[in-house]
Amino acid sequence: MQRSTLHLRNGDTSVVLDLTTDGLPAIVHWGTDLGDLTTAELDGLALAAVPQRVSGGIDVPARLTLLPQDAFGWQGTPGLDGHRAGLLFSSALALTSHTATEHSATFTARDDVAGLELLVELDVTPAGLLTQRLTLTNLADTPFELGALAPTFPLPATATEILDTTGRHLRERSPQRRDLTVGIHLRESRKGRPGADASLLLAAGERGFGFESGLVHAVHVAWSGNHRLAAERTVTAESFLQASELLLAGELVLAPGESYTTPLAMGSWGEGLNELAGRFHTEVRGRAVHPTRPRPVTLNTWEAVYFDHDLATLTALAERAARVGVERFVLDDGWFLGRRDDTAGLGDWYVDADVWPEGLDPLISTVRNLGMEFGLWFEPEMVNPDSDLARAHPDWLLQPAGRLPVPARQQQVLNLAIPEAFDYILTRIDDLLSTYDIAYIKWDHNRDLLGAGDARTGRVVVHEHTLALYRLLDELKVRHPGLEIESCASGGARVDLGILERTDRIWTSDCIDPIERLDNQRYTGLLLPPELMGAHISGPRSHSTHRSHDLSLRAGIAFFHHLGIEWDISRLTDAEEAELTRWVGAHKAVRDLAHTGRVVHADLPDESMDLRGVVAADGSRALFTITQRTTSANYPTGRLHLPGLDPLRSYTVRLAEPFDAVPGPGQSPLLWAQDGVTTTGRALATAGLQAPILYPEELLLIDVRAL
Ligand code: DGJ
């Protein structure tokens, strides 16, 4: 039987679609570039994927299409769920037309009985991502209540193991794995933000896939409200991923003629997670909004002074910050009306004259005169019941009918979908940005949304509230060109490519303990390149784990990222100041490389060690950190391989600035580290080099340069 196929190619990726299926087209291949295929070869590929009819089954075996529907026999989770007051629950959207370029396609499908039209926009990007966006339009003259509309990505048969991330405040993006067996693995956020425990992405691959090997596919949804990621396997041996907004009951009712468009669902793949993440990084770096100027080394005042705002103390901190090389000074929580602790004030965005009798001018002038940018903390979507705002406008707080949601950090949420509330918050922030020389906002969001209804209508409004948040951020960026914004949410609870379309970095976690940050940054890095992740050097003793670490470990773990300091450095000794200054200087000397290079993680058999690095885009140079997490059972620890180098080039490996010696307790010199050693990228990736003997919780930085 003749098939009708499309072959989309870009970024070393092929996507082959069979258009001959019932309903919408089916993706019959997503992954490695298949090269030029003739029509006959494409037909063959598509035909080879058609299943046989089975006993006890339906007459025409169902296919996993771009929108699996029960009307065509699909018995797994459908791509669309909705109804008209309980009727017309089973859609039969069937392809009516399509357009295609070499790398993209659109498909239009209609169901005249259900009164629905669907548009699927599919693109294989230059980075090799497969992106999908679906738009559903209500063609009939009655409302259509939408429950779910889910972009669907097929998995190869070899995908039998799932990886996703979970977490909590102070431990975001902790990996977890399980088998992909028949059934569904569902990761949802019902918190109005991705949340600390949300999965950044959902990956499925060959058993035991790692960073360096094993075919693996993953999806991410570029959305900052509620979301749903699912991995499913059916008894008909179809495996797939879905990535969509999660819609709550009654949240989305399409009026006649109205449409709903899903957030962008993004799929990546790779032979190992390094390649999969590399595609996301290339994509993110290719966006017009991606920051291009060097990421300013930041000092954030939170762990230095908390709510204790005092001009003299902060001036001393700013002076010391400038001396060690800080380029951006950020005043955290505590500057506005009534905000002496976390019980009051949110919503009253006026500088508190009790603490700042002359306003913020004296501090900002000092900071600017020292050559640094000034940044200010806000939590615009939040309101303390103990605030003038809440007292004046109780109906601006999100709530189900008749009661306030349970408090979290003594706060409630401002309903940005109310135009007056939106205007109030826009005016307050705009006014402060216009009055003061503020280059940066740390935009915080410290509670989950629960019972997120509109007090006036009683309807759930997470979707509208999220869109209003995006409008607010966009408007501030238009009014204040060059303004940079950080997405912070109880640390790293709002990390997604929706918020990052209008913000410039994320706060990766409130936990700055470098050992905890190893996994946090590694798994956040599945989606984000290091320049978008805030990584700060804490004080010697971590405030969240009470462990103490040397500066070299604290700085070394933050080194490749958007570097900052979160520490009261006003009382450093001269020696400590000199050491910190060296680290900041060393970072500035290599941040170009770190913020444009390819990130690689080594799969090490000895889990007591961590080896990761960034390789310059042209392969000419690389930097690696070797971290001894715990003691090793081996002594010495044996050889380490350096992944990601050009196998055909020769490289010299030596200690990187600011190291001038191996810091550990080794009994004799590590020969290669003394004067450096030169060999090929292939040799370094296979034979490798002897690991340094390090104390546990100690790190070494190495510099690798092509000859
Ligand atoms: C939570 C953030 O993650 C912290 O960095 C800090 O800004 C506090 N909020 C301030 O309340």
Image (cartoon, rainbow, N blue to C red):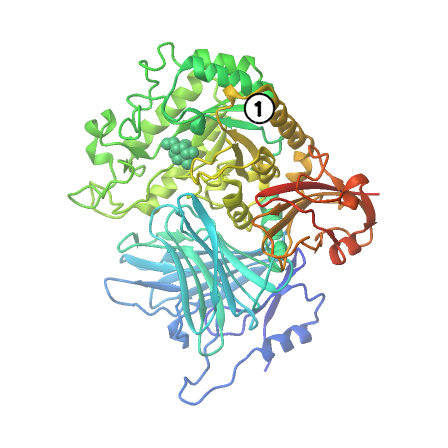
- Is 591 rendered above or below residue 163? above
Quadrant in the picture for the C terminus = top right
- Number of numbered discs: 1
Mark 1, Cα crowd under 10 Å, few <14 / some 14-19 / many 20+, is many
Closest to the observer, 667 or 341 = 667
- Is 155 rendered above or below residue 483? below
Residue shown at the point (24%, 42%) measured from the top left: 454
Residue shown at the point (27%, 30%) measured from the top left: 343
Residue 253 pos. (x, y %): 29, 54
Residue shown at the point (61%, 65%) measured from the top left: 215
Task: Please indicate whether residue 540 sits to the left or right of residue 456 in the image.
Answer: right
- Residue 157 visible within the image: yes
Residue 321 image-quadrant placement: top right
* Residue at which label 1 appears: 326
Residue 334 pos. (x, y %): 36, 24
Residue shown at the point (79%, 55%) measured from the top left: 683
Quadrant in the picture for the N terminus = bottom right
In terms of image quarters, where does ligand 1 lie? Answer: top left
- Residue 254 visible within the image: no
Secondary structure under badge 1? loop
Looking at the image, the residue that sits furthest to the left is 402
Closest to the observer, 95 or 67 = 67
Residue 668 pos. (x, y %): 75, 44
Task: Please indicate whether residue 656 sits to the left or right of residue 698 in the image.
Answer: right
Residue 49 image-quadrant placement: bottom right
> Hey, what amino acid is under mark 1?
Val
